[in-house]
Image: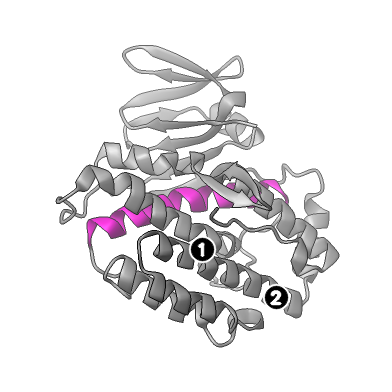
Amino acid sequence: MGWRVVSIENPAHLSLGRGSLVIKRDETVKLPIEDIDTVVIDNYAVTMSTNLLSELAVNNVATIICDTSHIPCTIVTPLSQHSRQSKVTQMQIAMSQPLRKNLWQAIVKQKIVNQAAVLSKFGYDETAGKLIKLTTEVRSGDTTNRESIAARLYFADLFDDATRRKPTWYNSALNYTYAIVRSVVARSIAARGLVPSLGLFHHSELNSFNLADDVIEPYRPFVDDYVLSVISIRHVGDIGDSSLTKGDRRLAIDILNNYVMINNKQFTVRDAVDITVESLVRAIKDGATTKLELPRFK
């Protein structure tokens, strides 16, 4: 399994050479593809060969392409690389509605628990207590919309913005880092034979990654904490400008090396995502919500 995240921010040509990613600029750099987890392309002057794209996909490397605002807008995911693609897809399609709702209930509960942990870390214990109470009220399918209620309380304290619609630096940093994690979730989903567009709760006809938007939810509070604890340190007294620097984006990408807990064991975000997606496949196969393994804070 790869571990390296490669960010290409300057004009370059990328190609394949004897199992390595070859980066040609003023100097040529070669990186073994087996060591690479993610490639982020953040410059419109970057070109790459199709055989490199193919090799990256075969090796389950997430290739993320950013737009002019430096926000990830495209991910290249493997197609039918899973050894039991058809079987997993059929199980996913045949999943019962009660199981879908129960899985979503578990995801929402863990997301709110994680949000409460972030609030407590930053001294908002009273609101954290309110969120913990909300977790006891989350019903199957979250029919009473406790996720939304928790989010308003959470963002009102954490970012002084209950709707998170202000065009601030924090929003830019959150959106970029969410997109990085979402891309890795989408890669993991596709690699395990699941159909990314078939979600548990999210179901937009225009969204090719509905399932990724379900799975990422309990990981979002880790992004919030990372932005506040790590990236914003560079901007003490200077967060009025909503633009992100190259340094900000590099730090955001490193969220994949941050740690979360699953079953009392510590894993990087990238490894934890794989564990969560693998457990989702087991939960669908066995019809058991208890098989779902989600991240939490220490």
Mark 2 near mark 1, Cβ–Cβ under 8 Å? no
Residue 141, x across and y down, in percent: 63, 80
Residue type highlighted by circle 2: Asn
Q: Is residue 191 magenta?
A: yes
Residue 228, x across and y down, in percent: 33, 53
Q: Residues within 10 Å of mark 1 (few under 14, many from 20)?
A: many
Q: Residue at x 75, y 74 (%)?
A: 99
- Does the rendering let one see residue 296? yes
Which callout, 2 or 1, points to the residue nearer the camera? Answer: 1
Label 2: which secondary element = helix
Residue 52, x across and y down, in percent: 55, 27
Give me the C-alpha separation between circle 2 and circle 1: 18 Å
Rendered view: 146 above or below 40: below
Which of 3/259 is in front? 259
Residue 146, x across and y down, in percent: 51, 81
Which quadrant of the structure image shows residue 210?
bottom right
Q: Is residue 279 magenta?
A: no
Q: Which residues are magenta?
A: 168-193
Residue under circle 2? 102
- Does the rendering let one see residue 200? no
Mark nearer the N terminus (2 vs 1): 2
Q: Which mark is residue 114?
A: 1
Label 1: which secondary element = helix
Left or right placement of residue 207 versus residue 226 in this view: right
Residue type highlighted by circle 1: Asn
Rendered view: 146 above or below 248: below
Rendered view: 187 above or below 29: below
Q: Residues within 10 Å of mark 2 (few under 14, many from 20)?
A: some
Q: Main secondary structure of the magenta part?
A: helix
Left or right placement of residue 96 versus residue 239 in this view: right
